């Protein structure tokens, strides 16, 4: 019994166990799934989100599309490529200030 070696943690054979690498791979997949779920929940067109959202695809181009989400309803509008289409009357003028904000001045209303 004098030939017994003292136990050493570094000499443990658990490092060669293939099941431990499978457990590590499962942990990595759980982290990836959590990140993907967060990305889906942050999407403005998420069907579970209750806020309204507007998404414009290809702005200023001929194939521009606009997606409008109001509650659970999703509407898609496509651009015809024409400018000034429709009927109406001039309602006022919009001005862009140096700080980037916009001011709308209605036409025909006088300020006293």
Image (tube, rainbow, N blue to C red):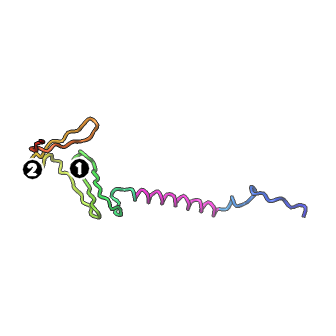
Left-right relation of 91 to 57: left
Q: Residue visible at 23% across and 38% down?
A: 96
Considering the whole magenta stretch, tell me its main secondary structure: helix
Q: Residue furthest right?
A: 2
- Residue at (27%, 60%) from the top-left corner? 70
Q: Residue at x 83, y 59 (%)?
A: 6
Q: What range is drawn magenta here?
A: 18-40
- From the top left corner, tell me how far across and down residue 72 is, in percent: 29, 64
Q: Residues within 10 Å of mark 2 (few under 14, many from 20)?
A: few
* Residue 63, numbered label: 1
The question of residue 30 being in magenta is answered with yes
User: Which quadrant is home to the C terminus?
Assistant: top left
Local crowd size for mark 1, using a 10 Å CA cut-off: few (<14), some (14–19), many (≥20): few
First in sequence: mark 1 vs mark 2: 1
Residue 3 occupies which quadrant of the picture? bottom right
Please check the rendered image and state whether residue 47 is part of the magenta-colored stretch, yes or no: no
- Tell me which corner region of the image, top left, top right, bottom left or bottom right, holds residue 100: top left
The label shown at residue 10 is none
User: Residue 14: percent from the left, percent from the top?
Assistant: 70, 61
Q: Which one is closest to the eye, mark 1 or mark 2?
A: 2
Q: Where is residue 32 shown, x and y percent of the image?
A: 49, 57
Q: Secondary structure at mark 1?
A: loop
Distance from the alpha carbon under mark 1 to that under mark 2: 24 Å
Residue 88 circle label: 2
């Amino acid at each position: 019994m004098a030939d017994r070696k003292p136990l050493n943690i570094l000499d443990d054979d658990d490092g060669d166990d293939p099941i431990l690498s499978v457990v590590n791979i499962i942990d990595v997949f759980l982290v990836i799934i959590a990140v993907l779920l967060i990305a889906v929940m942050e999407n403005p067109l998420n069907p579970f989100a209750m806020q309204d959202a507007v998404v414009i695809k290809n702005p200023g181009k001929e194939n521009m599309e606009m997606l409008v989400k109001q509650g659970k309803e999703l509407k898609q509008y496509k651009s015809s490529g024409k400018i000034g289409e429709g009927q109406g009357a001039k309602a006022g003028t919009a001005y862009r200030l140096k700080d980037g904000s916009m001011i709308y001045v209605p036409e025909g209303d006088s300020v006293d």
